[in-house]
Image: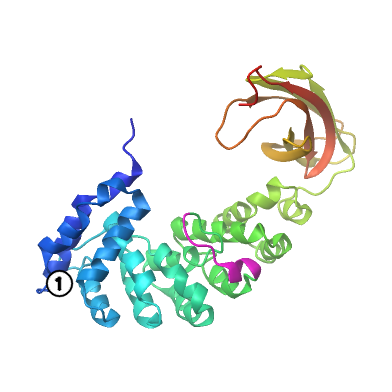
Amino acid sequence: MAEPLKHLIGLHTARDTADAVARAWGTFDHAAFVADILPVIDGLELMQRGQCIADALHRHLPADFEQTAQILHACLPAPDRVGLSGWALLSFNQYIAAHGRGQLETALALLKALTPHFTAEFGIRPFIAEEQDAALAIISSWALDPNHHVRRLASEGTRPRLPWAMRLPALVKNPTPILPILEALIDDPEDYVRRSVANSLNDIAKDHPDLVADFVERHSAGASKDRLWLLKHASRTLIKKGHGKALANFGFAPLDDVTATLTLESQQIDFPGELEFEILLSNTGKDMRTVLVDYAIHHQKKDGSLSPKVFKGKSLQLKPDESVTIAKCHAFRPITTRVYHPGAHRLEIMVNGTSAASADFDLAMPRDGAE
């Protein structure tokens, strides 16, 4: 059985933190710090454990943030010393985010020093939210930093919808201030950084699809293999949703001469079960066609309406007058992210983002109700 994530931080982390702080600040009360954490940490989850240690740091370190920032900086690894790294630095993120407000330059400098040893993407976001222009002016310069962890922080820390972290509503509404950062990093030599750029653009695409499709179009001409991968990964949500321009950016333009015929193995599926179907694709034209085939399951909701979810199919090329049959099987199984309801459902075939065929089927649930 896998070890719970929360065990990444525990009493051992508190002791390691106390050791590092005591080396950096001679008047630190090591025993009192650990005793402050000991009674509560085992009952907490991962992020709460980090916050528990961050709160104890606040109680046992100087109230002056500038002084404490120097102490925390001295706890980080350096050529002449062993320091804290990994999940032990989550509490540093949380401490800086809570107590570095109003000390923007000092706080960002400390997060920049921290990020090569553990991501600082959690700690940086409150400063962007509260002082966006000033924070981005500093963060933008990190795109040229020799350390790839710092460059990645410039992209990852500014993502509008970063998972596990606070959302940045102003950048969700208007992401244009971070586009220069993403452009500066689009050809970064590190895949680690380029992947972050792609994820940030994918975040933006959820709220501003046309903006990202235009960004991809502008940066596609003469693009290297690595950049093309980045741009396609950035467009994954748009492609999945059948956004016309996003599909056209990668050669999947709408097609008038490719037809799809859909055949269901059965029009009733017993839950749990599988929907088996075949798609006959035919190129009726006189030119080779590049085809992206996806499918959408329109699930019935509790109120009887249908809600589509797109699933990835495959891409292929069809010669003139060529036909290809694709066999697929979609499983209906209990999952934590969906409640299934009995009754009419629909299968829809998407060819280059355009609906090409559909068929209805019924989902029969067990007698004891939806699972």
| Percent coordinates x, y for residue 209 in the rendering | 71, 59
Q: Is residue 148 visible?
A: no
Q: Left or right: 318 with respect to 29?
A: right
Q: Residue at x 65, y 71 (%)?
A: 174
| Percent coordinates x, y for residue 298 in the rendering | 75, 35
Q: Left or right: 249 with respect to 115?
A: right
List the residue tagged with mark 1. 24
Q: Is residue 168 visible?
A: yes
| Percent coordinates x, y for residue 23 in the rendering | 12, 68
Quarter holding residue 106: bottom left
Tell me the magenta residue range: 164-173
In magenta stretch: residue 337: no
Q: Amino acid at mark 1?
A: Ala
Q: Is residue 42 above or below residue 90?
A: above
Quarter holding residue 56: bottom left
Q: Nearer the viewer, residue 89 or 256?
A: 89
